[in-house]
Image (cartoon, rainbow, N blue to C red):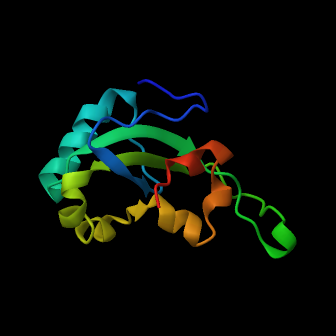
Amino acid sequence: MERNHIGNVVLNEGFKQVCVWPATIVGESQIKAFEQFILDELGARVQYLEEVLTAPDKGKYDREIAGTGGRNDVIFAVHTEDVGKFAIPRLSLGIRWIEDVYGNGGGYLYEPRVASYKTW
């Protein structure tokens, strides 16, 4: 996978909307199977981008909460033509738009470069 100057995977042509699937593991050997699963189950073409481990949760005064963090989240992009039909069914699996993660204060869970996947 080609990465840009900050370390994010370069999106293929036609893929723009990036999603986060929390607490999910795909693994390098299962990328094609993951992409096929989303196509079969949700009718959307996706591009697997990467998996990231989360930072610890933060509590009062922005202090890290012991015993949290280290959750594996999958980051992937949806083909622009499939976003409409993917938008509602994704919710049943807990898949979120990356912009919603950041807009609801969850961006601290990821290293700063991940924020550049946002498009709106």
Identified at 16% across, 49% down, the residue is 39
Residue 115 place in picture, x, y as percent: 58, 51
23 lies left or right of 38: right
Q: Is residue 51 left or right of residue 109?
A: left
Residue 82 drawn above or below residue 114: below
Q: Please state which of residues 32 and 82 is positioned toward the viewer in this rendering.
A: 82
Query: At 18% from the left edge and 58% from the top edge, which residue is drawn?
Result: 42
The x, y position of residue 104, in whole percent, is 58, 73
**Vertically, is 81 above or below 97?**
above
> Which picture quadrant has residue 26?
top left
Viewer-proximal residue among 58 and 115: 115
96, above or below 35, in the image:
below
In the image, 15 versus 89, the foreground residue is: 15
Q: Position of residue 99 (x, y in %)?
A: 49, 63
Q: Residue at point 29% right, 70% down? A: 92
| Quadrant of the rendered image containing residue 67 | bottom right
